Each structure stands twice: as C-alpha cells, then as structure tokens.
Amino acid sequence: MAGTYRKTPRAFHACLAAFRGPGDRLVLVGKPPGLSGIRQYTGEFWTSRQRQASSLHEISYRACFKPQLPRFFIDLLTRPGEIVYDPFSGRGTTAVEAGLSGRNVIANDANPLSRLLTEPRFFPPTLPEIAARLETIPRDGGQADRDLSMFYHPQTEQEIAALREYLIARNEEGTADATDAWIRMAATNRLTGHSSGFFSVYTLPPNQAVSPESQRRINKKRDQVPEYRDTHALILKKSKSLLSGLTPAAMARLARAGEGARFLTGDARDTPSIGTGTVKLTVTSPPFLDIVQYRDDNWLRCWFCGLDEEAIGKTITMARTVAEWNAVMGAVFSELYRITAPGGWVAFEVGEVRKKTVRLEEHVVPLGQDAGFSCECVIINQQVFSKTSHIWGVGNNECGTNTNRIVVFSKPDSC
C-alpha cells in the first residue's frame, strides 16, 4: 500500500476492503458495537517487521504508538509536501515519520518536553560531532538540587548535574546549537530504565520515572545499590543506535521538513497559529482518561531539562470521567475541523480503557460528527504479544494493550 494516494472516501474504502495483511489474511469487515452504520475493519494492518521503522524513533515515552501506524495513513492519504499534524505529539512519532516521508510537519503538545524530544531528530549531528562536544562538557562540579541518591551512584549523579547545568546555561546564553539539543534529548532518554544502558539503577521501563519513595522500595526489594554509569559513554552509545539506520537521503528529507516545521506548545483546543483549512492529515492519540499520569511519569525528565513540572502539570488535561473527556475532545475536534483542508483526514487512535468497559471510539465518533466531519470507519489493528504487555503482565489483546483502535474521519471537499 506504500506510495499510493487515495483522495476520496470511496477510494479509501476500496483500498481497505482489498487490503491483505501479513500472511495474505483478508481484513474482516463488520459493524462495531454501539456504532450503527459505521464500518469496522479488523486485521493486522502493520507489524514491526512489515515496514522496518527508522531507528530514529527509539525514544521512550509513555503511551506512544508505533511509527508504522502514522506511516500507514501518511502513505495512504497524503502526498509529499502536504501538512501532517499531531495535536498530542508526545515523543513526536507522527512528526518524525512525516518528516522521513517528505511531508510538512506541525506538532503540538501541552508539555514542552515533547518539543525537546522531537525537534533535535530533524537535525541530527554526526557521531564525531557528538563525541567532540561531550569532551568539552565537564563531568564534575555539578550538584543536584534534590536527592537522587536512590537512582544514581554519587559520581553518576554529579555527571548528570554537571551536564544539566551546562545545557541550561547554554540555553540561557543563547549559544545552544543542534548538537547540544541532541545531547539533551539523548540524555533525557537515558535517565532511568531497567538495564545497564541507562544512567540509573534498575527501575521501571524508561517511559516513566517512579517517585523517590517508590525507587527506595524497589532498591530494598531487589537488594540493590546504584552502580557508577558513564553518562557520556551511554549518550554516545544511544546516539549511535538512533543514527544507525539513517541514510543520507533520509537526513536530507528530515532537514527539509525541519526547516519549515512548527513545534507548538499549547492547548490542542486553541491553535491560532495554524491556518484554517491547511492540514491534510492529522494522526494522533489523545490522553486516555486518567490512566496515564503524564506529569508524574516525566518529573525527572522535566527536572533535567530545567522545566517546571508542577506548572506543566496544570496545563495537561487529565479527565477523570468520560463526560469530562468528551467535553475536552469535543473542543479539540472543533479546532481540528477548522484547520483541516477540504478533502482532508483525521486518524484518531483511542483505546479500550477500564478493562474494556469503555470503548472510546463509541464516544469519538459522535464528537467528530458534531464538529462537521464524516466518520468513514473504525480500524482495529490487532497485534501479537508486545514487550510492554509482557512487562506489565498483561495478556495478549487484554486491556487494549495490543490493539490500535483508530477512528477515521474525512472533511467534505465542498467545505
């Protein structure tokens, strides 16, 4: 399906109906419960092996989707040069994939951490440039302004604090460049994790940071003490991994996209800097009620980057009821309708939450329709066991962990 372009809803449905997933298994077609008249396509539309994703995506972030998901819709519904948007950008999967595909990019997120993780990957430095810059950054003299001894060896903590002070000073002086931004991004991604590839002692997966109290309990239970980790060596190792599959052609596409890209920090319900009728495709996954604590998960990353996690937390929408969530997303859809071009599309990925008692697609469909969109279908991509679900002890296709549920909307050409 790569390289095709389907402008009309009729052609879009014809493409889906004819789609053969891995193993030549035809897609199943039906009607989803609670959504009379809406078509549903279920199957394995993409896998991690079906279309090898760029190594540049390997930045951990809570509740992110695989790059194969936005790539599926970018290939199907846009042409090079058209605008692809994500109002809840997170680690920047949609933005980076759009850039790699030669599309123009707009990314927005309430948390400024999103921009710090996304923008540097449009302008990656070379490994020699990263190594040379790390040589100029002091390893000692830094001091953390909070107790991090439960995560780090004293020498490791000193290196992290020194690096933090260097990066913040460079930003305040206005001398920070693309190499500094890359090092900050890579270091932010290595702060905590569950292997020797991270700065910390063993803790939870790297897409979140537990509280100091919780880490003390982990240390006690595992009878572990933080060992020294060479932060500069780990930054270089992670950089090598991120850059490993990046071809000169891909770097050129990223640079072209990055020059005109917009990385916004704000409320997805109000994006006045995005022109009316300019976005061809939105691919996004919004916050799912209160099941992911974005502020708590990122407190250590925010500290390292010099961001105020308390102030940021107040800007992040964490709806606790479906009614609250509907109110917020209804306003988001109104704004999406304004910025979407006539003939444009929205792919809105949601999930089954609260042990499958809430299927958010049943709420998303009327929200999009009320805003003026036509709901074309619900696509359910089913996958086999994932690494993350094993870590959390969740069975295959339980709790929505191994399915992507995407509601697809179109905006009539006549608008």
Image (spheres, grey):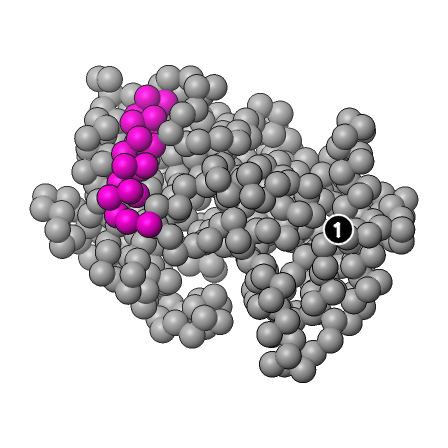
x, y percent for residue 189:
65, 53
Point 37% across, 62% down: residue: 401
Residue 347 drawn above or below residue 239: above
The magenta stretch spans residue 288: no
Range covered by the magenta-colored residues:
320-341
Pick the front one: 138 or 398? 138
Residue 91 drawn above or below residue 280: below
Indicate left or right for 255 with 378 as reference: right
Point 33% across, 40% down: residue: 347
Please tell me in which quadrant of the rendered image residue 253 appears.
Answer: top right
Please tell me in which quadrant of the rendered image residue 267 appears.
Answer: top left
Say which residue label 1 marks: 145
Q: How many marks?
A: 1
Please tell me in which quadrant of the rendered image residue 262 appears.
Answer: top right
Dominant SS in magenta: helix
Pick the front one: 385 or 88? 88
x, y percent for residue 286:
38, 44
Indicate left or right for 293 with 223 as reference: left
- Quarter that holds the C terminus: top left
x, y percent for residue 316:
46, 41
Pick the front one: 120 or 305? 305
Indicate left or right for 83 with 132 as reference: left
